[in-house]
Image (cartoon, rainbow, N blue to C red):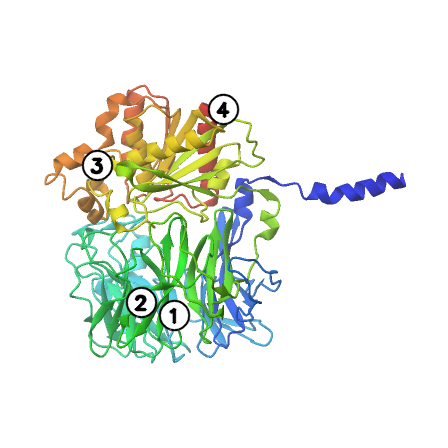
Amino acid sequence: MRRFLVLLLLLAPAAAQTKHPFTFEDMMALKRVAEPVPSPDGKWVIFSVTDVDLAANTKTPHVWIVPTNGGTAAPGRLGEQSSPPSDARMIIANQDADRPRWAPDGKRFLFVSTKDGGAQVWIGEFDSEKGTVPATRRLTSIATEAGGALWSPDGKSILFVSDVYPECDGAPADEEACNAKKLDDAAKSKVKALVFTRLLYRHWNGYKEGKRTHLFVVPAEGGTPRDLTPGDYDSPVFSLGGQDNYAFSPDGQEICYTSNHDKVEATSTNNDLWIVPVGGGVAKNITADNPASDSTPLYSPDGRYIAYRAQARPGYEADRFRLMLYDRKTEEKKSLTENLDRWVGTTAWAPDSQSVFFGAEDSGESWIYEVKVIDHYAGTAPFWNSGPLSGFNDDLVLARDGKTISFTRMSLERPIELYAWNFILETPCTIREPKIHDKGNPQPGDCKFHKPEPLTHLNDAVLSQVAMSPIEPFWFEGSEKAKVQGFLVKPPNFDVNKKYPLKFLIHGGPQGAWGDDWTYRWNAELFAANGYVVVMINPRGSTGYGQKFIDDINCDWGGRVFEDLMKGLDYAEQHYPFIDKDRECALGASYGGYMVNWILGHTNRFKCLVSHDGTFNTESAWGTTEELWFNEWEFKGTPWESRDLYRKWSPHLSATNFKTPTLVVHSQRDYRLDVSEGLQLFTTLQRMNVPSKMLYFPDEGHWVLKPQNSQLWYKTVNDWVDQWLKK
């Protein structure tokens, strides 16, 4: 008996370490980490973490904190892991709390909470020695709610955004009363009709209802908020996330924000940068000379410059984002990244105002770059200073010591965690400039860096129990002999001697990309988990391969892209013998949904298809979308101006070829691609006697976000694929 017990004890660790395939429930158990916000004294990093309660169908953010040593880890090669800190913890447990931002003195921080109903700005007192929050208090009580708050650099006031009725512009107290009354009247009225007098009456997943987004300022100790951007314009403009479209000047006396004042906003990408005194005054447009988009302003610490991102071609939302500098004294502007053929992402100033750091996507990953600001912002070539930080690195912010970057990192196998990195070289060397269009990423030469230090490991407990496969990149020759990249993910417990069915994923955008990054909506690991090989191709139009590669999709939606995709699948079938080419299903959303609809009429190589929120009829899609600039750029005008091009690339005109069993998914509140597109597709499939099913969400938009809706989405999609590939 004793020997038997010893044997059980010896076997127990091995049994405990058995990993299972990734499940939807595993994914919902993961903590969703937001961007890092270092404290002014450099001792702490504050951030929000969202928890999902699948049973309650809720997502709740909380404020967390973790101490940091400033990233001064022992030197090593970049990409190496170090032992995880164990001190990350929640510091506000009794209420939801999101988007924390430090006061300049580090003794307080603001956050947004819905504790008393609608979203409002709250203040948390902070004990830096203990890392605790002794008390919280609500700062705002505005009827139209508050979000996106920032602390002024002098600590005296707080900036926030709110959606208000522009006709209520006036004295602060009267304005608040006017907005409150209009909201109350609308809620009590039994008539819910709306009257429109111009375009962009709805956007993304909601009707604008006559309201505009404005910026307000309120004293940090409390008081009546004051509207800094009155008028019938969105100031700042609509955004789906990313860096703020507004910022304080270092002296706290001015703000810069993004607003579009063109007459027909639905056809315009002409976002401009405006500046206005915090004390009140007339706003000034400082980028009126550029008819394309200018956005995400960020003042240099010394107050001399405003860094921002700009595009050059009006009406084209997928033009290259350049890093620009505006000199506040001379009003001159200069691009710092003309020789870098990549989109500039999140930006961060060095504390000495001598350089700007930014993220940029390249070949399925996101890298950190630095550009020097020399001699009145005459920019040198941007040089790469991040080493092989594999995966996606974003949300970067520099500490006041000028040596440490805090940032988020994710990969296909791991959701976002926080990192700190002392990027100062351990040994002097010459860093090579980035080499674009090379197989693989640029190399750092013989440079030796400090290694990045992981600040959080919040999801280790869940992921340690899960079997996942790494992403495997491959390159092939696409249409017109272009180099095209694809990725492959194997199922857990992979056996090279077996044949596996395949899920062929097609990304949206079309100016988007697959890569070594995490997503909760189209998770490749979850698609592979029930015994599938997953293949993803970045065809023409994909980001991270240069602007020409992106532009090659313009006016050619079913041409080069379709050929790239089919050649990529051919390559995978030829080079990975474990793929069963007789059991393949193509799945896509948004533009990926369009391409699935195009595939439906142009090839029968797939055993099934999944079309989510895809364009079916290009002419009706033009008439029901909100952002008309997208369709009018891609098809060179309106349907009556460019009918031949609209009809050339419209999937509905190939309906007589439809044979492949198709699952259609669409949502009522999708105003980017109206639900009528999905209904038309499903109706056509039924009338053509093609095996088909439709999944309809009355309470979702372009993305399926509610936890239980997401659960149904994954189950319905995977069951559909199983039905046709696992008979």
- Mark 1, Cα crowd under 10 Å, few <14 / some 14-19 / many 20+, is many
Q: Which mark is residue 726?
A: 4
Q: What is the secondary structure assignment of the residue under circle 4? A: loop
Spatial separation of the CA atoms under disc 3 and disc 4: 34 Å
Q: What is the secondary structure assignment of the residue under circle 3? A: helix
Q: Mark 1 points at which residue?
A: 150
Mark 3 vs mark 1: which is more N-terminal?
1
Mark 2 vs mark 1: which is more N-terminal?
1
Q: Identify the image quadrant of residue 222.
A: bottom left
For the question of whether residue 695 can be seen, the reply is no
Look at 15% across and 44% down and name the residue there.
636
Mark 2 vs mark 3: which is more N-terminal?
2
Q: Name the residue under label 2.
A: 246
- Mark 3, Cα crowd under 10 Å, few <14 / some 14-19 / many 20+, is many
- Badges 3 and 1: C-beta atoms under 8 Å apart? no
**Image height check: is 580 above or below 468?**
above
Q: What is the secondary structure assignment of the residue under circle 1? A: strand
Viewer-nearest residue: 57 or 131: 131
Q: Mark 3 points at which residue?
A: 618
Look at 27% across and 53% down and name the residue there.
208
